[in-house]
Image: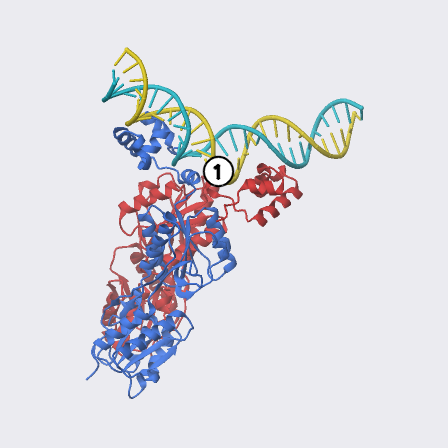
Chain colours: A blue, B red, C cyan, D yellow
Amino acid sequence: MTTRVGIRDVAKAAGVSVTTVSHALNDATSFRVKAATQQLVRDVARDLGYAPNKMASGLRNQRSQILGLVSDEITTTPFAGAMIRGAQDAAYDRGYVVMVVNSGLDSELENREINMLRQHQVDGVVYARMYHQSVQVPAELEGLPTVLLDSVTDDKSISSVIPDEVGAAETAVEAIIQAGHTRIGMINNMDDIPATHGRREGFLNALRRHGLQHDPRHLVIAQPETAGGREAALGLLGQPDRPTALFCFSDRVAMGAYQAATALGLRIPEDVSIVGIDNLEIIADALWPGLTTVALPHYEMGSWAVHRILDDIENPGEPAVQTRLDCPLIERGSLGPPPR
Amino acid sequence: MTTRVGIRDVAKAAGVSVTTVSHALNDATSFRVKAATQQLVRDVARDLGYAPNKMASGLRNQRSQILGLVSDEITTTPFAGAMIRGAQDAAYDRGYVVMVVNSGLDSELENREINMLRQHQVDGVVYARMYHQSVQVPAELEGLPTVLLDSVTDDKSISSVIPDEVGAAETAVEAIIQAGHTRIGMINNMDDIPATHGRREGFLNALRRHGLQHDPRHLVIAQPETAGGREAALGLLGQPDRPTALFCFSDRVAMGAYQAATALGLRIPEDVSIVGIDNLEIIADALWPGLTTVALPHYEMGSWAVHRILDDIENPGEPAVQTRLDCPLIERGSLGPPPR
DNA sequence: CACCAGATACAAAACGTTTTGCAAAGGGAA
DNA sequence: TTCCCTTTGCAAAACGTTTTGTATCTGGTG
């Protein structure tokens, strides 16, 4: 193992002092080094494969260039991957790197993990949830720049980013209405979370905006999984005056609706149109026909959160901002005109 | 912002020197400090909320307690989440933390990201792929303890961990045979990757072991997605002497087989049994009936890789090891006895 | 009573950078 | 030629730990 090359090696090889090397490389203060010298130093550094030790520079600068990302649960959905990737890409672009830590639901463990992040002197923390929810920010984060990802809290001094739930539902239902439907059902989540309320509101907004009658029997709630969606859709689509289109709380619920439709001998989209939310590609692409759905901007939220935190670090004192990101419609094949 | 509490603050508060504090806290060399003093120091440190600065200790010890995890693509499947979580949990248990970096397919970017990891002085790197494949380890990793996750390379001096593809297929097919089937089809992947060959081999092994005739027309290849599985299954199940059970390359392919069976009016598992590989819960749980499948040990591989790397760091010189991890059968409802 | 060994605590150096305060060199104006 | 200013380079301190070598204290033994 070749012993790592340090700044003094570069200095020696270039025939200058370590000060000069440092100045040449971090050209901020570089009025102090001649252009030719700077070029020389850089060439030598590259040839030697010199990579500045961030532990040393971080120690000196009191800045680690590391961001922490703490999340609750990252195993079950691909959402986590998108968020992490969004965060990591943004961090990379700005010269930072991300430490990921996840704790399931164990807040004791979470605190210890946050403590580890602190020990590594992270410059800030993205506190992420996999499903949009309201959270209590752990006291351990006190004093660290923090932004909430896919979650909100009462403390308005903390920035946060969430999907625009109401807008997402409106987008979906608008598309359904544009396709010509007037009897539109919704299978909502039965859990008391922001997404449930927001999507219900968006659904009702869109109907109202177009002067459509809302039949309360067509708005049902279910467990937000495939089985729940299936049950609910069987009920909804079994009625004589069944809806001609179903807006589903999520793509998994929509998958249940597909199963129900198939079981009832209804073709999609000829007999019934179905629209979901999530753009969970692994499902939306796999359904037959493909599921028209509204994408949740996980990648963008991850990216936004990191940019916000870095802005805050580089330019402290800016007021916190609570953001809602747009959710675009992704068209596949499950939305068509109503039958007959 | 309260200025961070350092070791000298603890020393002052406890009325001892920083040396003593250090010794008291890292009890390795602690023969040098009286038990009572040690306890005192620890109490004071806890009360003050002292958290040792890892940049400083890392600089001194030449050990960052950080592991790098570089992966190709983490957005599309939940596999990445399981791997990362397995790695992170293992790291946490041993006092390490994980830096995640992902580069898509851009090897130029990958090199720059590995370089960032180096700058942060990571103690080792887990080089991960999302799908089992053969890779070339980038030269940038030279000199860093490295283990391959879900991938292998020619260089046998590098440890690696992959799923036991052959065993996974044998497990699946054994289960099918145990259920009483004798005409068993397989929808394999058309890509030339290790999983393709291993699963084919396992399929044939199991048949042979039970003296079952192998009808070449019942072993087909397809694009490893739902659409491919659907096409292939339509062909397979449309024949008069159709197989009574289908072993699918993946759960997504199996989902296509479900669609084909439904389209042909075949019930699962009464008319045809289906078994997959992956245990992609979001699909396997959502299908109706639930998909019996063989789990790929992503979490375990992540954990194994980290433990291996830490063993290597703490105890250098141990020979590299190439591991294959078992893949357990997960029973849901798609495997039953053959019809009639 | 003097001495010594063992137990305990301390001061200082080192890890690899960045940055400040100075010194040296170079060049132009008087 | 002399002086002074500008440009360029250097030495040293600092960041927060760990660890080595040494000093001090305690109490037991001869």
Q: Position of residue B162 (x, y in %)?
A: 37, 53
Res B278 seen here = yes
| Badge 1: residue crowd in 10 Å (few <14, some 14–19, many ≥20) | few
Given the image, on which type of amino acid does mark 1 rest?
A: Asn
* In the depicted structure, whether residue B182 falls above or below residue A69: below
Within the image, what quadrant is residue B222 found in?
bottom left
The reply, left or right, for residue B325 in relation to residue A43 is right
Q: Residue furthest bottom?
A: A240
Task: Using the image, name the chain to which the residue with label 1 belongs.
Answer: B
Percent coordinates x, y for residue B77 in the rendering: 33, 60
A183 w.r.t. B205: above or below: below
* Residue B301 position by quadrant: bottom left
The kind of secondary structure element at disc 1 is helix
| Number of numbered callouts drawn | 1
Residue B282 location, x and y as percent? 36, 67
Query: Is residue B160 visible to us here?
Result: no
Q: Percent x, y for residue B167? A: 38, 59
For residue A72, which quarter of the picture?
Answer: bottom left
Q: Residue at x 39, y 67 (%)?
A: B175
The quarter of the image holding the C terminus of chain B is bottom left
Q: For this view, does B100 lie left or right of residue A211?
A: right
Residue receiving disc 1? B61
**Near-viewer residue (A63 or B68):** A63
Front position in the image: A154 or B136:
A154
Q: Residue at x 65, y 42 (%)?
A: B37
Viewer-proximal residue, B318 or A201?
A201
